[in-house]
Image (cartoon, grey):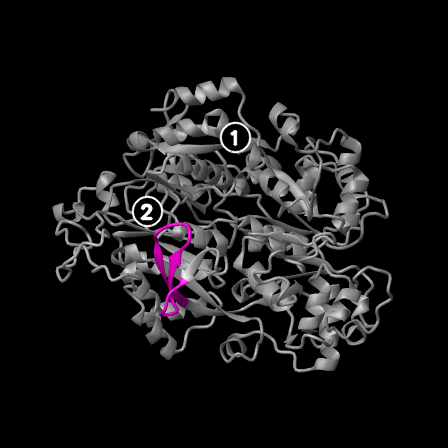
Amino acid sequence: MSVKTTKNLGIAWMFVVLMMFSGLAGCLGGDDTSEEDKKVEQKTINIAGSSTVFPVASAWGQSFSEANPEYVVNVAGGGSGAGASKVCSTDSDSVNIGDMSRDWKSSEATKGDDGYTFACESSDVTVTQLIVAIDGLSVVVKKGGAADQCISSMGGLSMAQLRWMYSDWTEADLEADGLNMSSVTPDNDNDGVREWSDLSSGCGDSEIKLWGADSDSGTYEYFGEQVFCKSCFADAEPVSESFDVARGYQNSADDNQIVNGITGDENAIGYFGYAYYEENENVLSVAAIANNDTHGVEDAGGAVTPDATTVADGSYAPLSRYIYMNVNNDDWDLVKSFIEYGFSEAGMEHVMDVGYVALPQSMIDDMVSRIGGNTYTAVVSGCTDSGADNYDPSANTDDGSCKTTATSGTINIAGSSTVFPVASAWGQAFSAANSGFTVTVAGGGSGAGASKVCSTDTDSVHIGDMSRGWKSSEATVGTDGYTYDCVDSDVTVTQLIVAIDGLSVVVKKGGAADQCISSMGGLSMAQLRWMYSDWTEAELEADGLIMSSVTPGNDNDGVREWSDLSTSSACGDAEIKLWGADSDSGTYEYFGEQVFCKSCFADAEPVSESFDVARGYQNSADDNQIVNGITGDENAIGYFGYAYYEENENVLSVAAIANNDTHGVEDAGGAVTPDATTVADGSYAPLSRYIYMNVNNGDWDLVRSFIEYGFSEAGMEHVMDVGYVALPESMLEEMRARIG
């Protein structure tokens, strides 16, 4: 089974869309469900593959399941290669629909006479290929950065210049293959380094840093097919021209990682589907492309910027492309209504909403005519078993396609973004080993984790993730210290510690803030409070802060600047820009509880000290947005769980923290950097914390084996793999004893 994970804006590399079927409320204790409703069986459509098709599949799945609550639509990534292999699979990893951003390879499937039915090479499965949208593969750079200024000054880039940038061929090889190098790189200094200044005298002499998709992705293959020598990359055996890994081509299956890489380096360039550019157009610029394979853009002219019009009419060439869903022909009875929804007016509106171009009506008509699929053989199609879900009374020969919906165990988890990586890793491994289970993991914050595990409505979950303890307004704790009675329902839950986290304070690697903090040896808790608090400096001093120590370089201009923290020239006089979690997050609450006045923030009614929104505190439930905000501003500072720092340590630096509430770090000393050792032994104080899963006690029969897996040796290895600290054996034994 696939793991279904959801997270706001991105995420992680695998993402899932879920809507629960309406009968769940009755199963969890509601008395309103009719006997007829109780008989409705859950139907699960599993989709996996291309990250480019992912937004379309997710949007269709969410809206379709909202309108058809008996359906669950699971959407996972993995790349076009995974989409091809999983829709062709007859094992437990099989899916009903494989997403691809490229056509089929001859090594994967053979095309039928109709041009859209494919026979898998690795199995007896046949699939129907459906075009679902039109995409414009987009070449992007950091907005306002050096690369952006360079490309803007030239009016774009040509296909020949993209080839020169990305190719692992020498310049001599490229020239021998037809590139006019005096036009492609008119200012080449011939130093062997491919620099922006080689393209134009108006560009800086920094090396071009390359980002893009990984080799499992259809985007990787499509871009390479269009950019490189046509007989040297596409289906070549062996490939003789490819992406220049030796010069540092950085690749990822997760488009959010590519965004982070590019926004963290103003000399970087990358590519992905237009939808991901549109989602990140506040931090990225897209390049106009001239369809010329031999000359530079200034000689070629005619560069075209991708947008809905240029992608649809084909003028954005050759980087416009179709993207596909491929349906297992045995699964049409299950997926037919979903596909019909996709090609409806509402479905095409979703295509446009996520940033792609909708199909013209003539193409929609063609795709709709493919619904139901064709077969390669003369065997009479249809299921003759009247008890099957897909019984066809007109069929006179059973083709073996009869299906009866099986009852499967679906474990639903939601809540803290901090716990999200642990839950996702456990869920993926557990469902891979136990094919009868589907594990869905959604975000929403600790508040959502608390409310959903306590809910008896259709939004309820079996496990609520939290990065903080329970509030008295949410639940009351029992005498054992870990059983909680929900305030708003009769649900009781068991609290389980699943990992140890070190809340990490981060800045852009190598930026002004990084240099300042490094020169001081870190920051103190008092200095963090001064940065984030909405109290005046006079109020902070009255509450115990020694301001002459906290801000020894303060110029008293009313602006909280990096130069206020130190007299060192390493700290510039730029204003400190604040980033962090939003108010629904346990991370927001934990950080505030540790940093601010203890009687003024934590459970205070009303809160009298909080984050300084008036000075521009930027907050998000999506840690990737926080990463983008910080890497886009060298004077920014932010905080989140250690796992997200570790995931982005190539573009972020983490601050050592001194556990001193009154003085600055240079007087306090003893600043500690978070890592596995300091978080585990408690020396990284006070920002070390436990993170939790909370199990609805009515659901233990369903989730018991999942939780047991989590507290196994393999489960703790996943905790460490995602960047947190595993529990010691004594604590593991205590958690196992809580399993109901």
Give the distance between the C-alpha atoms of the residues marked 2 and 1, in whole angstroms. 26 Å
Specify the segment rendered in magenta.
111-131
Return the x and y of residue 384 as percentages of the image width and height.
Answer: 15, 54
Above or below for 366 versus 173: below
Quadrant housing the C terminus: top left
Q: Are marks 2 and 1 in contact (CB under 8 Å)?
A: no
Give the amino acid type for the residue marked by disc 2 in the picture: Asp
Helix, strand or loop at mark 1 = strand
Residue 372 located left or right of residue 46: left
- How packed mark 1 is, by other alpha carbons closer than 10 Å (few <14, some 14-19, many 20 or more), is many
Q: Is residue 220 visible?
A: yes
Label of residue 499 in the image? 1
Whether the magenta-drawn stretch holds residue 687 is answered as no
Above or below for 605 versus 143: above
Return the x and y of residue 676 as percentages of the image width and height.
Answer: 63, 30
Residue 673 located left or right of residue 382: right
In this rendered view, identify the residue nearer to me: 553 or 164.
164
Helix, strand or loop at mark 2 = loop
Label of residue 302 in the image? none
Give the amino acid type for the residue marked by disc 1 in the picture: Ala
In this rendered view, identify the residue nearer to me: 166 or 168.
168
Return the x and y of residue 584 as percentages of the image width and height.
Answer: 47, 46
Residue 57 located left or right of residue 601: left
Residue hosting label 2:
459
